[in-house]
Image (tube, helix red, strand yellow):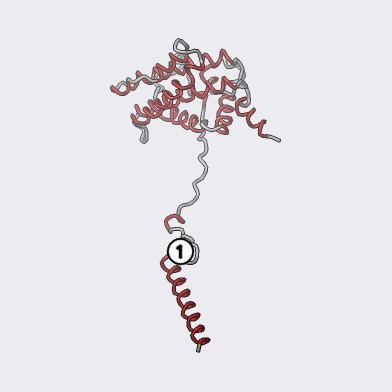
C-alpha cells in the first residue's frame, strides 16, 4: 500500500512538472527553463545592413577659386560645391576619414602649402599639433557649408543645423583652441569670434557666411606658417597606428 502511495505521489509530481513546463513554454514564464529566445520581428528582418557611405566625387580645385579670377556668374553659395565640402568634412571626423580626406587635399594643393593656404589647411601635415588645429579649420568650413546650403534652401539644412555646428565650434574654442593657441589675444580667439557670428539669426546669412570665410582664412594662414609643406599622411594618426603595431 505504501509503495502504491509513493508511486502515485511521484506520478502526480511528474504531471505537475510537465504542466509547469508547458506553461513556461507557452507564456514565457521562467519557472524551469531560461526565457525563450526572442524571435526577430518580420519588419526587422526586412531591413538590410546599410551600405558604407562613400565619399562622393569631389573637385577641391573648385572650392577656393580666387575672387579676382572667378566669373561673376559663379554662385558663392553653390549647393554642389558646398555639398561636396560638407560631405568631405563629415568624412574627416574619424582618424581613417581624416587620413583619406587630407590625402585628397594634399593632392589638390601640391607640395607647397604657402602657395595655396586655403586647400592647404586641409592637406596632411606630419606635425601633430598642426593636425589638431586643422580639425578646427575643418569645423569652421563645415559651418560655412551649412550656412551656404541653408541660404540656398537645400532640404535638410536649417537654422538648427547652423546652430549645431556653431555649438561644436564654441565647445572647441572654449575648451581647447583659444587656451592652447595663445589665449584671448591670439589669432584663434579672433577666428572663434568670427566663426560664432550670429547674423543669420536676424536673417543676414551672407554676413555669417563671410565671417566664417574670414575665420577659415585666419586658421589657414596660421597652418601654412606652422607647416609650409604638405605630406602624404597625417602624423597624428600615423604615429598612433605605428604605436599599435607589434
Give the camera-side residue of 232 and 22: 22
Name above or below for residue 149 compared with residue 11. Answer: above
Q: Position of residue 151 (x, y in %)?
A: 34, 27
Q: Looking at the rendering, which quadrant does residue 140 occupy?
A: top left
Task: Look at 32% across and 20% down and name the residue there.
Answer: 199
| Relative image position of residue 105 (x, y in whole percent) | 56, 25
Q: Could you tell whether 238 is left or right of 160 in the image?
A: right
Furthest residue in direction right, as rendered: 246
Of residues 198 and 148, the one nearer the viewer is: 198
Residue 62 visible (yes or no): no
Q: Position of residue 70 (x, y in %)?
A: 45, 18
Q: Write the residue at 47% across / 28% down.
A: 85
- Disc 1 secondary structure class: loop
Examine the rendered structure and indicate whether residue 238 appears above or below residue 121: below
User: Residue extending furthest front?
Assistant: 2
Task: State left or right for residue 117 relative to residue 78.
Answer: right
Quarter of the picture holding the C terminus: top right
Residue with the most extreme left position: 202
Check the image and name the residue furthest to the top. 185
Circle 1 sits on which residue?
30
Amino acid at each position: 500500500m505504501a509503495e502504491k502511495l509513493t508511486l502515485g505521489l511521484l506520478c502526480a509530481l511528474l504531471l505537475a512538472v510537465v504542466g509547469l513546463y508547458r506553461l513556461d513554454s507557452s507564456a514565457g514564464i521562467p519557472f524551469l527553463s531560461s526565457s525563450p529566445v526572442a524571435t526577430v520581428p518580420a519588419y526587422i528582418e526586412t531591413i538590410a545592413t546599410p551600405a558604407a557611405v562613400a565619399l562622393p566625387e569631389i573637385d577641391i580645385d573648385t572650392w577656393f577659386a580666387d575672387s579676382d579670377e572667378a566669373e561673376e556668374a559663379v554662385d558663392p553659395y553653390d549647393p554642389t560645391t558646398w555639398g561636396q565640402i560638407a560631405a568631405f568634412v563629415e568624412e574627416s571626423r574619424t582618424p581613417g576619414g581624416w587620413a583619406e580626406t587630407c590625402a585628397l587635399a594634399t593632392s589638390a594643393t601640391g607640395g607647397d602649402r604657402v602657395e595655396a593656404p586655403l586647400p592647404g589647411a586641409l592637406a596632411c601635415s606630419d606635425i601633430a599639433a598642426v593636425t589638431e588645429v586643422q580639425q578646427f579649420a575643418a569645423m569652421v568650413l563645415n559651418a560655412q557649408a551649412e550656412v551656404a546650403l541653408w541660404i540656398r534652401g537645400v532640404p535638410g539644412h536649417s537654422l538648427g543645423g547652423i546652430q549645431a555646428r556653431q555649438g561644436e565650434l564654441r565647445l572647441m574654442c572654449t575648451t581647447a583652441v583659444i587656451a592652447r593657441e595663445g589665449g584671448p589675444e591670439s589669432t584663434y580667439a579672433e577666428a572663434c569670434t568670427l566663426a560664432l557670428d550670429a547674423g543669420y539669426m536676424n536673417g543676414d546669412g551672407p554676413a555669417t557666411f563671410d565671417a566664417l570665410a574670414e575665420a577659415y582664412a585666419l586658421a589657414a594662414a596660421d597652418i601654412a606658417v606652422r607647416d609650409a609643406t604638405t605630406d602624404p599622411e597625417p602624423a597624428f594618426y600615423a604615429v598612433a597606428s605605428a604605436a599599435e603595431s607589434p
